[in-house]
Amino acid sequence: MRAPTTRRHRRRTQLLVLIAIVTQVAGNVFLSHGMRDAGAIVSASPLDYIRALNAWTVAGVCMLAIWMITDLALLSRADLSFVLPVIATSYVLIALVGHFVLDERVSGLRWIGIVLITFGVLVAETTPDRTTRPQGESL
Amino acid sequence: MIAIQWRLAALTSMCNTVGDVLNTAGMKREPEVEQLGPRSLFAMLALTVRNPLVIGGVASLTVGFVAMMSLLSIANVSFAVPATAMSYVLETFLAKYILKEKVGLRRWAAATLVACGVVLLQW
């Protein structure tokens, strides 16, 4: 695979990846906290989901909206097959925060999972972030 | 009869996969976001709201998000996340054959390692 991107391009892509990871982790943590208060919802009606809104779910949705904008910007400049594994760092982050900050127990299998994801991210990082031809102009 | 949580997991995976592929296809038709300031991000948003692929992608991700919320309200994270981990491999496959990305051995290895790791993380 030939790398058509510059070092500066790569650094900006990595910055977007970092923002996407942080907003995704924060969004999911806020949302799962809020959904625990809301109780079970399996419905096709939007009203049932609106009733689940509380401070935590609203904060979660706002974070995920920022994640969505960041993700779109990222996909305008990097391959999906590059972005997907790299963003999976968020799983490792959640597990490490759980263990070192929240004192949660991490089993042996979980540690193996953390190592596998980390290797996956490192392997993806050795590939160019974009292998398709970019548009002539940029924003 | 397939349990409701498996149907929700399948719906979540399918919507996330379709959404990511549509968003990538749509964003590759737009100019690359080079400056990361609010001005270029707003310019990007102004372009994407008229891009049918991105509109379809965001709609699909929204349905996937609601399905995941429903799933999380009736099943543990230890079921929900591994049940949707296969989408890493599926999306890499579609990135190669639909989006025409150059997916070499290292990208396949990365997707497979991450998918296996995500499954193991839930124990």
Image (tube, rainbow, N blue to C red):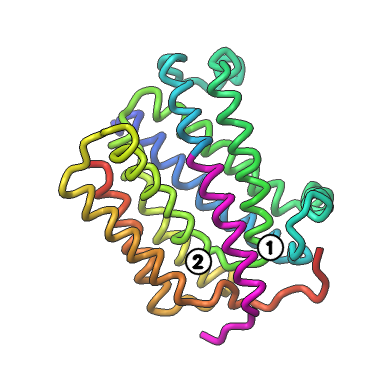
Q: Is residue A20 magenta?
A: yes
| Above/below status of B8 relative to A83 | above
Dividing the image into 4 quarters, which one contains the C terminus of chain A? bottom right
Residue at 60% x, 59% y is: A15
Query: What's the residue at 66%, 54% (across, down)?
Result: A72
Residue indicated by mark 1: A76
Query: Does B96 appear above or below A32?
Result: below
From the viewer's perspective, is B95 left or right of B5?
A: right
Say which amino acid is labelled 2: Ser
Q: In the figure, residue B37 lies in which quadrant?
A: bottom right
Mark 2 or mark 1: whose residue is earlier in sequence: 1
Q: Is the magenta stretch mostly helix, strand or loop?
A: helix
Q: Nearer the viewer, residue B31 or B87?
A: B31
Residue A132 x/y as whole percent: 63, 76
Residue A35's spot in the image, x, y percent? 46, 21
The answer to whether tags 2 and 1 share a subunit is: yes
* Residue bearing mark 2: A81
The residue stretch that appears in magenta: A1-25
Label 1 residue SS = helix
Q: Is residue A5 magenta?
A: yes
Q: How far apart are marks 2 and 1 (CA)?
A: 13 Å
The local crowd at label 1, few if under 14, some if 14 to 19, many if 20 or more residues have their Cα within 10 Å, is many
- Please give left or right for residue A42 compared with residue B28 in the image: left
